[in-house]
Every structure is written in structure tokens, then in C-alpha cells.
Amino acid sequence: MRESVFNNYFTNAPSDVDVDSIRQQWLSLSAPYQVDNWLLPLPLWATRGYDHGGPQAWQILQEQLQNGDEKRPFCIYIHVPFCSSKCHFCDCYSFKLGSRQLQHITRYTNQLCQELQLWSQQGNLNERSVSTVHLGGGTPTFPGTAPLTQIVNTCKNQFNTNDQTEWALESTVESLTDEMLNTMHTLGFRRLHLGVQSLQEPVRQAIKRRRPAIEVLQTLERTRAMGWVVSVDLVCGLPHQSLAGWIDDIQQLLAAGANGVSLYEFLVYPQNHKWAESQGLTNPDRHTHNYFMFQAGASILSQHGFNKNIFNHWADTQDKNVYFTFPTRGEDCLAVGTIGDGLFGEYHYRHPRYAAYLRAKTAVSPGLEGGLRRTTRENALQPLTTAVLSSHIPTLHLPFLQQHISNGTSLLEKWQAANLIIRNTQGGYELTSNGSWFAGNMIREMDCLIA
């Protein structure tokens, strides 16, 4: 049965796809690793709730930052939730502004800058080196060049950014005009995360992508010619997708110069369920086909010499993915703006949604929603959790995986049998494409074993 399901899907597969390797990955899976039962690697606050409300969390962070390590770098994440329209597939916290658009942008920009200034006054945070400033969303370029210039200049004036700081932003082709790109380049940005999702026109129309695929490729080529590193996002499981189209997307993007590719599965949430149902994207078999597509994409990227620096991101040697890999360097993360998730030491904090953020933020408080401190158990698991999410498990973690037994089998043996991990040249392990699909399950298993 499993073999026939596989063969039916990969009949007439593009010749570049390593079908035999994918078959081996597929046939090695058995309970509990079922492709329709994979888990997201959720943040701590999403799995057990906050220890403290917003005001107490802010007080704890203020006290903690008084004794911050001045030699410890940190990164900055700034969330901009606005978009020109809400794409049907999107599960991110973002929205289209209605009336009084300019007032919303002005107020939110000012509030972000005030929050940045407030954080810079805590302890020695303004003296510590900043590894990267990442603008996420939403579509961070939507507000326009003037608000973004104000935000960037605030960062530069309030924090210790330098020539080594990576300035990165997420965007769509629609809002990345020549004026925007030139302004961002002048401000120091050299990394772009481009939301592509698909280059196939029927797919783009179905998900409400307004600009044609040729403009995506032209933007990628133009940005690369300016010396930027460009990463693209692709989503499997969208309407009208085919394996051949998916592979063609990847090959076109690589030919245009993409330095990195993140692969995602389309996820059905309450906010997109009605649309997903109307497109036939809620059937029980969808995960199997999406898994096959994910595997095929990983196969093509590996053949082109791309390696993972996080579990679902394949990169060339130029793409260091500095923001998303900050846990591997043991850095803190200052997050500002609505729903921003930050981390200092063992303490995680989060901001509220937009309206609540506007109400809660004051001159002396960032208006946090809540915070929590990692427990002893969570601290014990943190290094290995980070290793799994980075897709690379060094030798120092192997004793843990060998010593923890479930049903007579060590976790290491269990992961090997399911082809989730494979030996690397350093004596440790790296996640296979199966491991990338089940990274959240692997983390949950570790947690359950020492609970």
C-alpha cells in the first residue's frame, strides 16, 4: 500500500528528482512518525503559558538587564504587521489597514522608535554589539521609505550597530519598488527574505499574489546584482500545485541567484480555514502529497550544493541566516512591536496584538503581554533543542540520545531507524529531510523522556 501510494505520486516525476532516495525516506517511516501527525516546534509560551503578566515581566527584564554581559552580542527583531492585502494562505499575524492608514503607520512607527529608545536605556544594552537587525511582518516595506528610515536611524542612534551588523528585511515584490530598494540599500540592508510561495501563475492567482512571476525573478536578480543575499520562501500544499511546477519553481529561483530557500507546508488555521476548504485543501490525504513535494524540493536543493542552517532552510555559503540562527550562537534577542517574541538569558517575553500593544505601551513600559523563565528541565533540553532546530547535532549531545530509552530503544536508535538523522563528517548527526519534517516531534520526544 505504501509503495503504491509513493509510485502513484512520483509517476512521471521530473528526472532531476532523486526518487529512489525519497522512497527510502518514505518507507523508513512508521509509527509514531506519520506524515499527517507532524508537530510544530512551538515556543515555550505557546506550550505552557506565561509565568508573569506584562508589568511583572518588564520589571524582571529591567533587573536582569542591569547585569547584562557587555561582551554578549544580541539581535534585534522589529515586527511590522501591515500588508497591502491579506493573502488567502497566510497564517502570519498581519492585516490590511482600513481608513486612517497614514495615522496608523505614523503612530505605530513612533511607538516602535519609543520602545527601541526605552530598551536602549536598560543596563548596558546600548553598548552591546548587535549581530543583526531583522524587520519582519506582515510586509515591513509597506509603510514606505520615510517610516523605515526613521526606524533604522533610531536603531543606529540607540544601539551599537557596526559594519558587521546584518540588516535584513522581509518583503514582497509589490512593495519592493526601486525607490524602496535603493533606500534600504543606502541604509545598509544587504539581506532580503522574499515571500515567493510559488512562481506558477494559477497558484499565485489563487493565493492572491498580485504581481506576475517574472517580476519576482527580476527583483531577485536586481537585488543580487546590488550585492544582497536573497532568501526565498516556498509553500507546498497550495491550490493548483504540481510536482513538476514545484521543481520548476526551485530551479528558476536558483538560476536567478537565490542564496537560500525555506520550504514550508501550507497550514490550515481558523483564519484561513474557510478559504482552504473552498480550495479542497482540507482533505486528510493532503499531508502525504505535501510531504512528497517537500522531499522532492529538498532533493533538488541538496543536489545544487545547498545545506541546511536551520531545519527547513537550505542555504549556499553566502547565506548565514544570521537572525534565524541566533540561538546557535547563544545570543539574546530584543524583539519590539506587536506580537514580538524576545529573549534575554533564560527569560522569554512576548508583546500583545496590535490594538492592545498601542494601548499598553507607555513612556516607561514596552507594554508586554507576559513572560516566563525556562525551568531546570527546559534549560537541560535547550542545547539539544537548539541543535535539532539548527539541523546539526554535535557529538557532545549523543550520550543523552543514547541513554534515554523508550520501549527498549534509545532515542538515537529510534531516530536512525526512521531515517530522521544521518552521520556527518564531524562524528555527530544532521537531520535528513525526514528529520526536517518531524523536527517538532523530535523535540517533543526529548521533553517527554525527561518529564
Image: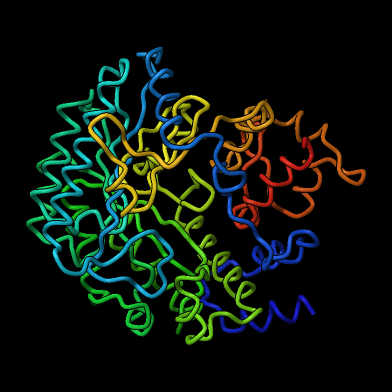
Q: Residue 35: name its quadrant.
A: bottom right
Hey, which residue is sitting farthest right in the picture? 408
Q: Residue 10: name its quadrant.
A: bottom right
Between 305 and 213, the residue placed more toward the observer is 213
Residue at left 50%, top 47%?
A: 308
Image coordinates for residue 52, horizontal then vertical, percent: 52, 34
Image coordinates for residue 193, horizontal then vertical, percent: 31, 53
Between 306 and 271, the residue placed more toward the observer is 271
Q: Quadrant of the C terminus?
A: top right
Vertical position of residue 350 compared to residue 170: above or below: above
Vertical position of residue 313 compared to residue 333: above or below: below
Q: Residue 324: name its quadrant.
A: top left
Q: Quadrant of the N terminus?
A: bottom right
Image coordinates for residue 70, horizontal then vertical, percent: 35, 13
Residue at left 75%, top 48%?
A: 415
Residue at left 46%, top 51%?
A: 314
